[in-house]
Image (cartoon, helix red, strand yellow):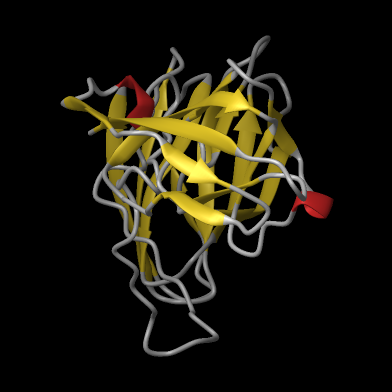
Amino acid sequence: MSQYNINLQPGVPMRQQAAGRFFMVVSITGTDHVRLYFDVRGQGDRNDEEILTARPGFKLKLTSNRFDSVLFQADAACTVSYVISDNEVDFDFTEGATVEATVINPLPLPVSNDRGAPGNPVYVSGLTYEDAPATAVANAGPIVCGPAAVVVMAANPNRKAARFCNLGPDDVALGGTGLTWAARCIVLGAGDVWVEERGANIEWHAVTDAGATASVTVQEVMA
């Protein structure tokens, strides 16, 4: 493998007499592309391969013949760095690269520091906040529930899991703010237990049917 540099003037073709099967443009300084003409053995003076817009990273590999020379031409003054070899080679074109982006709206960019808390888990493939070990379990005494919803567990961003047990005697419904028996979804009979993990950090309410009563105990698993 050999690496070369060639300086081009606008519109002036320059030929590199170097034979090989593999060609690659490593870099171009002064413009974004060049034109290339490859003379392939057995084809006389004919330019057998012509590339009009060869940019950095461009590769050409011949499988049955070898080229004897490469003709370069550019529309602007530039310097081309390239490789000629009989074997296929590669370069890391991403090393030291920069990315430019145009941000349309909004400005300034909003920044939110609400990720990574129990209420907003950070999800990485194969690893979530739930994988982290708990630090404590908090138990609370029974809470009397009736037809008017009451708070059975206050919001806590450091809570990993919430557990609710209905001691009875009647059914009880669990839910969020504004919960009514008519809008019940999670219903616990006497002796039933509900374990909540995805919504453990929020405030939880409990309510019974008209004329009913229930006693609810709760348990918190803390981060």
Image point (45%, 72%), residue name:
101
Q: Is residue 100 left or right of residue 72?
A: left
Q: Nearer the viewer, residue 87 or 50?
A: 87
Foreground of the two, 11 or 184: 184
Q: Split into 4 quadrants, where in the image is the C terminus?
A: top left
Q: Is residue 156 left or right of residue 52?
A: left
* Residue 176 point in image, percent of width and height: 59, 54
Compared to residue 205, the image places residue 169 above or below, namely: above
**In the displayed image of the protein, which residue is found farthest to the front?**
211
Above or below for 193 versus 74: above
- At a point 55% along the width and 85% down the height, the residue shown is 104
Farthest residue, direction right: 182
x and y, in percent, of residue 18 in the image: 41, 30
Tell me if I can see residue 64 in this picture.
Answer: yes
Q: Residue at x 62, y 49 (%)?
A: 146
Q: In the rendered image, is residue 46 in sight?
A: no
Residue 84 in the image, given as x and y percentages of width and height = 40, 28
Indicate whether 42 appears above or below 104: above
**Quadrant of residue 99 within the rendered picture:** bottom left
Q: Quadrant of residue 40?
A: top right
* Picture residue at 44% right of the left edge, 12% below the top: 87
Residue farthest left in this picture? 135
